[in-house]
């Protein structure tokens, strides 16, 4: 009985801790939503409220009036989707080879992938700019997508190698014993088990590209090509002054696609993670 | 079979997507010149003013078209540097004078000395030209500037019976300290005479320090700059430090805040005054509760009067631009007296041009325009903006040292030691 009570109180404590963590994580987003619906005078209040006292859509109207948010969202969507798709298409077969055929080369390649993550933006941006300029890809979404693919590829590869290793090799061997060829085994046995990992990797690449600011700022010059993170900075002035209401409204809208995609794919991702956990 | 179809469809979609993304770089096949003008205007009124002016220029100059490109104050330095290195910089560049030194010395910006018309040269005072003069060249046209002013709660100020300062007769720094002490006592516990937003303490300290004779950066006969800390350099930091730590007449919690963050407390009657840039008035007009009365006061002055350092907004021309003459013509158009007034009003700042500054609409009492306009003649080039190595000194030495000093973590001797000793080591690396 005592043990049961301890267990119940322990469980309650766990839920409480989880709730605190959730509140901690959700606080900025909820505050963003609250700010997006507040009129300017409420934004300057000494005693701000969670629920706007005089809710308004004025910030959204102003955001859309002042900046080409829709065009920027389309650009971001194209760049992020294409980058995610290409990164996954390239990384998946590479990851399979690196995970299944271990050699000094694959170990070195994995090491290089990890090291390549250490290069900061500012170190690569000027050489990258010059390369893209020579290829006439400055101020093109295609050029930006290529950069995003290159930027996301190492980590995507690293992630997928882990997922491939989590798929039991014995399953492939069993398929081979049953007479399946290499392609058949990959398509019918490995790919379905790898799907959650691929989705998770694609999601990572998508969110990385969707949120990316600096490359887009430097590589895209004309307003009709700019992506959402760049357009959002147009609500910022010098010395950190901001047009807070429209900025919050636009930022809220910019966050939605990531949330929606994550909500849709979340079940598959956790499924994939659990599958890996059971194996180990 | 289904999978094969799916893969084919995906590949086709991707190919379609990517072919639709490439740029059709439309350079002028009709022989017309197109100039790219990157503006950092961000507030609606300011963006509208800039776009209207570009539209008017394009209507009257069909052979020299200007394309408006929206830039951003955030990361503008890195963005421009990359564009310069890649030979893709805009022709006309909007920036601030304190960001120009590296670009000017690096050869990225055109020397405008011979390109600008006499009208524009004569219209802008020499003290403003100095903000964009590096070596012997002029690398930007300073056109908008803002003094730092005290935004005050009018009711609290009026009820205190304290002498209200004017641009002609501002408070001295010592008087200001006594005023904030008196206001704090009158306002009661939890309230303060002043709230210093010192998230970025360096430019505020240096720029206001000019009024007390502070200079900190001294250029020798050999052209090299060294840092020396004189009595004048200690007046502003000393006043702020004592208000926070000794008198408790300045809020400690705002030391880490930006200007906007202090406004709710100001509107709520928690602070009687907030030292802010002149353009913050727009936010105050937008956000102040109904019936809230506020006024604009000049910043305190020292023996040298109400002098202040400023880093005006500038228009420059890229050295790589093949159309420098045309770009300079456009700048001359943008900064004609009436147009400069429109830009100033859009940004809630002061124009540098003498004729524009004389415009009656910038001398009304409403929203404190008159106080700001009266301060314009005392605005000088910010002390450190042409010093190479200043950004590193600011980030690595001065910002942490001043933040620690203002919060009471270190004393004045330690502050001086860090600013001078550590600072000179930084500057020396840039002046070998």
Image (spheres, rainbow, N blue to C red):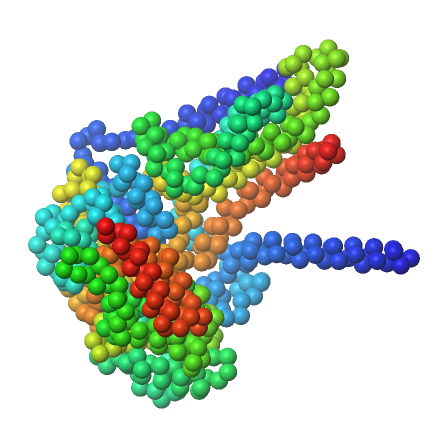
Q: Residue at x 40, y 62 (%)?
A: B400
Quarter of the view holding residue A219: top left
Nearer to the camera, B398 or A264:
B398
Q: Residue at x 10, y 51 (%)?
A: B117
Indicate whether B415 appears above or below A108. Answer: below
Q: Residue at x 40, y 84 (%)?
A: B181
Residue lying at the far right in this picture: please name it. Answer: A1
**Left or right of residue A264, residue B138 in this image:** left
Indicate whether B414 appears above or below B53. Answer: below
Q: Position of residue B265 (x, y in %)?
A: 46, 72
Indicate whether B159 appears above or below B138. Answer: below
Indicate whether A207 appears above or below B76. Answer: above
Q: Position of residue B188 (x, y in %)?
A: 48, 84
**Left or right of residue A128, residue B60 in this image:** left
Residue lying at the far bottom in this picture: please name it. Answer: B161
**Left or right of residue A26, residue B52 in this image:** left
Quarter of the view holding residue B107: top left
- Count the marks: 0
Quarter of the view holding residue B46: bottom left
Q: Residue at x 19, y 30 (%)?
A: B30
Location of the N terminus of chain B (image quadrant): top right
**Left or right of residue A84, residue A10 in this image:** right
Nearer to the camera, A40 or A261:
A261
Can residue A89 be seen by looking at this rendering? no
Can residue A112 be seen by looking at this rendering? yes
Q: Position of residue A107 (x, y in %)?
A: 56, 27
């Amino acid at each position: 009985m005592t043990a049961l009570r301890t267990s119940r109180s322990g469980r309650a404590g766990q839920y409480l801790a989880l709730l605190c963590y959730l509140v901690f994580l959700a606080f900025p987003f909820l505050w963003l939503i609250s700010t997006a619906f507040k009129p300017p005078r409420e934004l300057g209040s000494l005693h701000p409220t969670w629920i706007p006292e005089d809710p308004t859509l004025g910030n959204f109207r102003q955001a859309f009036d002042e900046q080409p948010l829709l065009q920027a969202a389309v650009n971001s969507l194209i760049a992020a989707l294409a980058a995610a798709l290409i990164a996954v298409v390239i990384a998946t077969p590479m990851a399979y080879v690196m995970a299944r055929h271990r050699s000094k080369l694959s170990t070195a390649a994995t090491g290089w992938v990890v090291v390549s993550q250490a290069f900061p933006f500012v170190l690569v941006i000027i050489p990258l700019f010059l390369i893209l300029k020579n290829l006439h890809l400055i101020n093109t979404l295609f050029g930006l997508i290529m950069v995003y693919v290159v930027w996301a590829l190492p980590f995507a590869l690293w992630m997928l190698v882990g997922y491939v290793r989590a798929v039991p090799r014995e399953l492939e061997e069993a398929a081979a014993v049953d007479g399946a060829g290499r392609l058949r085994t990959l398509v019918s046995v490995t790919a379905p088990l790898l799907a959650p990992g691929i989705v998770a990797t694609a999601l990572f690449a998508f969110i990385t590209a969707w949120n990316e600011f600096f490359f887009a700022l430097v590589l895209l010059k004309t307003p009709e090509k700019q992506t959402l993170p760049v357009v959002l900075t147009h609500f910022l002035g010098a010395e950190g002054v901001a047009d807070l209401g429209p900025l919050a409204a636009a930022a809220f809208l910019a966050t939605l696609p990531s949330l929606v995609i994550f909500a849709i794919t979340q079940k598959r991702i956790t499924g994939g993670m659990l599958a890996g956990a059971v194996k180990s | 079979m289904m999978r094969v179809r799916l893969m084919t469809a995906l590949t086709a979609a991707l190919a379609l997507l990517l072919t639709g993304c490439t740029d059709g770089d439309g350079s002028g096949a009709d022989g017309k010149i197109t100039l790219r003008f990157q503006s950092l205007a961000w507030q609606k009124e300011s963006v509208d003013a800039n776009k209207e002016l570009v539209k008017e220029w394009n209507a009257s100059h069909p052979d020299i078209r200007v394309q408006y490109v929206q830039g951003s104050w955030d990361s503008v330095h890195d963005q421009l540097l990359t564009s310069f290195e890649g030979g893709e910089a805009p022709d006309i560049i909007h920036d601030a004078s304190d960001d120009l030194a590296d670009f000017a010395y690096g050869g990225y910006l055109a020397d405008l000395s011979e390109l600008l018309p006499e009208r524009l040269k004569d219209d802008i005072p020499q003290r403003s030209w100095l903000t964009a003069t590096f070596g012997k060249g002029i690398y930007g046209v300073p056109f908008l500037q803002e003094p730092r002013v005290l935004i005050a709660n009018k009711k609290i100020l009026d009820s205190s019976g304290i002498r209200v300062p004017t641009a002609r007769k501002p408070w001295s720094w010592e008087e200001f300290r006594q005023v904030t002490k008196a206001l704090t006592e009158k306002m009661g516990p939890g309230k303060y005479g002043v709230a210093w937003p010192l998230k970025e303490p360096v430019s505020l300290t240096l720029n206001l320090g000019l009024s007390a004779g502070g200079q900190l950066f001294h250029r020798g006969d050999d052209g090299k700059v060294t840092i020396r800390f004189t009595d004048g350099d200690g007046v502003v930091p000393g006043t702020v430090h004592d208000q926070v730590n000794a008198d408790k007449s300045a809020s400690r919690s705002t030391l880490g805040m930006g200007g906007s963050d202090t406004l709710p407390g100001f509107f709520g009657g928690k602070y009687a005054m907030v030292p802010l840039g002149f353009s913050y008035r727009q936010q105050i007009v937008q956000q102040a509760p109904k019936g809230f009365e506020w006024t604009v006061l000049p910043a305190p002055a020292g023996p040298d009067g109400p002098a202040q350092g400023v880093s005006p907004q500038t228009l420059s021309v890229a050295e790589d631009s093949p159309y420098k003459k045309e770009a300079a013509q456009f700048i001359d158009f943008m900064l004609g007296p009436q147009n400069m007034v429109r830009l100033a009003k859009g940004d809630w700042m002061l124009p540098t041009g003498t004729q524009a500054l004389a415009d009656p609409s910038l001398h009304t009492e409403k929203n404190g325009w008159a106080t700001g306009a009266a301060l314009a003649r005392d605005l000088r080039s910010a002390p450190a903006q042409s010093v190479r190595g200043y950004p590193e000194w600011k980030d690595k030495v001065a910002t942490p040292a001043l933040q620690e000093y203002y919060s009471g973590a270190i004393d004045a001797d330690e502050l001086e030691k860090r600013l001078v000793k550590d600072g000179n080591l930084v500057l020396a690396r840039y002046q070998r």
